[in-house]
Amino acid sequence: MSRKKPWGGRFRAETDPEVVRFSASVHFDRALARHDIRGSIAHARMLARAGLLSEEEVSALVRGLEELGRELEAGTLPLDPELEDIHMNLEARLRERVGPVAGRLHTGRSRNDQVATDLLLYLRDACLAARRGIQVLRGVLLERAGEHVETILPGYTHLQRAQPVRLAHHWLAYVAMFGRDASRFRDLGARLREECPLGSGALAGSTLPLDRHRTARDLGFQRPSRNSMDAVASRDLALEFLASCAICLAQLSRLAEELVLWSSAEFGFVELADAYATGSSLMPQKKNPDVPELVRGKSGRAVGNLVALLTVVKGLPLTYNRDLQEDKEPVFDSAGTLRDSLSVTAGALATLRLRPERMRAAAEDPMLLATDLAEVLVREGVPFREAHQAVGRVVAHCLEKSADLRSLTREELRRFHPSFPAPAGELLDLERSIESRALPGGPARARVEESLAAFREELEREEESLAAEEGGGVGGTEA
C-alpha cells in the first residue's frame, strides 16, 4: 500500500488500513478536481516553456488532462480512496491515459502549493456564485418592493409595534443589507486574484527554472506569491470566505425569521406558496414555513464552519501541517449552504402571497403615532425630553381608559401639557406621518422611489460586473 503513495519510497511497512481511511480526503476534496486540472494544464505548459518538458510531452499531458476534465463533467472519473486525495487520483488516472510521462507533471511542484492554488481557484468561483445568488435575491426583493410602495405596515423594535412604514421601505432594508454582502464577496474576489501560490513548492520554492509569473498570468492572478512560506501555510482567504458566508446567512436568517412570524396566524401578513411550504403528518390544517425555518437553521452551520477553521489555524506553526486538510469541508459546506439558501429564499419571496389589508390594520394602531405627537410639542418649542414625558402620560391615560389616542380633544391633551395646539385627530394621521418622514433614507414615498431607482442602477452595475467576470474578462476562471 505504501508503494502507491507518492512518499512510499521512504517507508518499508504498509500504512494501517484505518489510517488510510482516517486520512483520506478524496471523498470531499474531489470538489477541487476541475481546478486541479486547470492548474496542472498551466503548470505543464510552463514546464515546456522552461525547457523541462518537450513539446511532445506537454501535448500528451494537456491532452490527457483535458480528457480527465471531460470524464469529470460526465461523472465517469474513477476515484480510488487508497490514493488519499483528488490530486493523486488525477495523477494516477492521467498515467493510465498517457503513460509514464504523467510522472513528469509534478516536476517543480508540491501538493502544498498545488492544493493552495486549487483552493484559491475554487474560492474565486465560489465568490462569483455567491454574488450571483445575492444578485437574484436582491432583484426579487427590489421587484416586490416596487409592487408595494403603497402598502403600509408597522415597523418594529423589540418585536413591538413602533412606527408605520411602507413595505417597500422594509424590503429595501434587505436590498441594502445584501448589497454589503455582495461587496464583501466582490472584495474577496479581488484578493483571490492577487497572488498565485503555484511554484512555492513544499515551502521554499524550487531550484528549477520555473516561470512563476507566466503561470500566475495563465491562471488569472496578478503575480506569483511574494513569500513561499506564506503561500502554502495561510488560509486567511478561506477564513474571509467563511466569514462572508456566515454574515450573509445570518442576514438571510433574519429575513427567514420574519417570514416565519409574518406567516403565522397571529400576524397573518403573508402566506408562503405551496411550493415553498410543507404540511403536518398529523394535523391536516397545518401549512408550515419549513423553507425559511431551514434557512434559519442552516445559518448556524455557516457560523460553526467559520469557528471550526479559526480553531484549526490559530495554533499552527509555519508552514504546512496536515491539520490544514480540515480547511476544505467547512469551505465546501458553507459555499453549498449559502448557494441553496439564497436560491430557495428568492423563490419563496417571488411567490409569496401578501395580505396588505392585515398589514394596514396593524399599522392603524394609533399608538404608532405617539412619537409624532411628541414632535408636535417639539415644534411648539418644548424640549424633547419634556415632550416625551408628557406624551408618555397621554399614552398611559389611553391605555388605562381603553381610549383611542386620536380621539383626545385639545382640552384633554392640555391636561398633560399646555402647548398642544389642536385636537389629536387633527394632529395625527397615518399617511401624513409616513410622508412627513422625508429625510434621506426615510419611508416617505419620494424617498422610497429614489431608493428604488438608486438600487436598480446598483443592480445593473453589479450585473455588468458579474457578466464580465463570469465570462472570464476580469481575472476570470475559464481555462
Image (cartoon, rainbow, N blue to C red):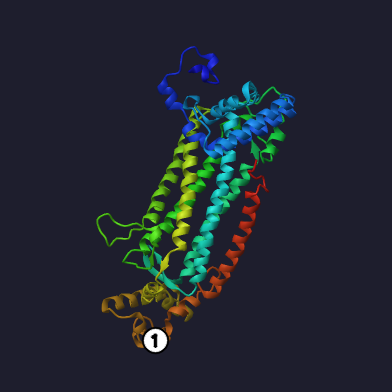
Residue 318 appears in the figure: no
Rendered view: 218 above or below 376: above
Question: In the image, residue 389 lies at what x, y percent?
Answer: 37, 73
Question: Mark 1 belongs to which amino acid?
Answer: Pro
**Res 252 → quadrant:** bottom left
Question: In the image, residue 469 lies at what x, y percent?
Answer: 64, 49
Question: In the image, residue 136 lies at what x, y percent?
Answer: 53, 57
Tell me the residue that label 1 is attached to.
423
Q: Nearer the viewer, residue 231 or 389?
A: 231
Query: Which residue is drawn at the image coordinates 33% and 63% (left, top)?
Result: 264
Label 1: state its secondary structure.
Answer: loop
Q: Nearer the viewer, residue 58 or 189?
A: 58
In this picture, residue 437 sits left or right of residue 295: right
Rendered view: 66 above or below 342: above
In this picture, residue 211 sits left or right of residue 397: right
In this picture, residue 235 sits left or right of residue 422: right
